[in-house]
Amino acid sequence: MIFTLLEQGDEVAAAVLDTTARYVALAIVTLQSLLDLELIVFGGSIGVRLELYERVRRVLPALFSRPISIAPSRLGDRAGLIGAAWAAGQALRQNFEPA
């Protein structure tokens, strides 16, 4: 719904997305500070929306002294589903390996 409103030029939707992007960027900065990650990948139906991704990318440099590598998932909004299927397959292999 927020993205539809944004496409219609709704200023409140744009402000909400800007605020959300700032909070996401702060979370990324926290993760980067703790874990020194090489890359942070955005996935899921909201995470891969360029409207959010680009806003986060723009605000990050003001929040952290070093560049942080971020990218939208190449799996798009199917990232969570594919990850869950992979984890299920791993669990099946571990629990049902032939003796």
Image (tube, helix red, strand yellow):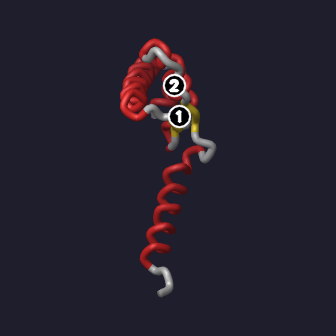
Residue at far right of view: 74
Q: Between residue 64 and residue 25, name the one nearer to us.
A: 64
Choose top left, top right, bottom left or bottom right for residue 72: top right
Q: Is residue 35 above or below residue 55?
A: below
Mark linked to residue 68: 2
The picture places residue 78, in percent across and down from the top left corner, at 56, 50
Q: Is residue 49 above or below residue 64?
A: below
Which badge, 2 or 1, is on the more N-terminal residue? 1
Q: Residue at left 54%, top 56%?
A: 82
The picture places residue 71, in percent across and down from the top left corner, at 58, 33
Answer left or right for 34 relative to 66.
left
Mark 2: few, some, or many residues within 10 Å (few <14, many ≥20)?
Answer: some
Mark linked to residue 83: none
* Callout 2 touching callout 1 (CB < 8 Å): no
Mark 1: few, some, or many residues within 10 Å (few <14, many ≥20)?
Answer: few
Q: Is residue 14 above or below residue 24?
A: above
Answer left or right for 19 relative to 77.
left
Q: Residue at left 49%, top 67%?
A: 90
Res 20 visible: no
Q: Residue at left 41%, top 21%?
A: 22
What amino acid is at disc 2? Ile
- Please give the residue where the numbered disc 1 appears in the rendered image: 38
Residue at far top of view: 62
Q: Between residue 43 and residue 18, name the one nearer to us.
A: 43
Q: Between residue 38 and residue 43, name the one nearer to us.
A: 38
The picture places residue 57, in percent across and down from the top left corner, at 53, 22
SS of the residue under disc 1: loop
What amino acid is at disc 1? Glu
Res 87 visible: yes
